[in-house]
Amino acid sequence: MIYEDITKKNIVDEYPILDKDLKIAQIGFITPTKGQKLSVEVMKNLKDRGVDASLAIIGSVREGDDEFKAMLDKMILYYNLSDNIVFTGYRTDIDEIISSFDVLFVPSTIEGFSLASAQAIMQDVPVLSIDKTGCTEVVEKSRCGMVFSEDSSVKVVADTLIKTASLDVKKIKEKHPDFLLSECSETTFKKKTANAFIL
């Protein structure tokens, strides 16, 4: 199986404010279609309810989306979330750090086969995805996460995220290995990674 030789690294050592009871990761370009605005709104909902949560937004700002990033920064300040959310920028060590999180959040409306989701599942991290992209297939076939509809309220998304984080992915994988063997083998994963960069 892939990732078995990966040296795990705790990103909390690098960003101490991530040291919360519920650690959430979102991976991808910072751009409107990737859904970071919803992520910030979900974090506000969680904080208002007293949930001790943190969010790492991992990825660089897509060219032309500086205003969108500035809007996110303003939202974070307005909602008093500066001690709960960090932007890590682009990372090349996702394999090493993904196991530091309790859940991977994928609210992107343009996702194909989600490589980040496969990485998370292989590291025993459950995935919450919107229900209209390729990530839905990863979640449903692996049974290692949950989905929410595009028209769900922020509260419903937050509730579903909490439920998703409680899933025991390691046990689920042991009971349902078929998807992992067919879609996340080292050969298949390398092929999907290569295809993702074909223009």
Image: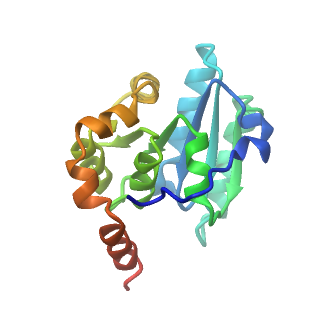
**Residue 149 visible in the current orientation:** no
- 129 over 153 or under it: above or below: below
Residue at x 70% of width, y 51% of height:
87
Quarter holding the C terminus? bottom left
Instruction: State the image coordinates of residue 5 (x, y, percent, origin top left).
Output: 53, 59
- 108 over 54 or under it: above or below: below
User: Which coloring applies here?
Assistant: rainbow
Instruction: State the image coordinates of residue 4 (x, y, percent, origin top left).
Output: 48, 56
**Closer to the camera in the image, 70 or 199:** 199
As drawn, the residue found furthest toward the top would be 50
Instruction: State the image coordinates of residue 22 (x, y, percent, origin top left).
Output: 59, 27
- 119 over 155 or under it: above or below: below
Quarter holding the N terminus? bottom left
Q: Is residue 79 left or right of residue 176?
A: right
Residue at x 62% of width, y 66% of height:
92
Residue at x 62% of width, y 55% of height:
7
Instruction: State the image coordinates of residue 129 (x, y, percent, origin top left).
Output: 37, 43
Q: Is residue 184 left or right of residue 19?
A: left
Q: Is residue 165 left or right of residue 53?
A: left
Corner quadrant of residue 39: top right
**Closer to the camera in the image, 184 or 136:** 184
Residue at x 38% of width, y 79% of height:
194
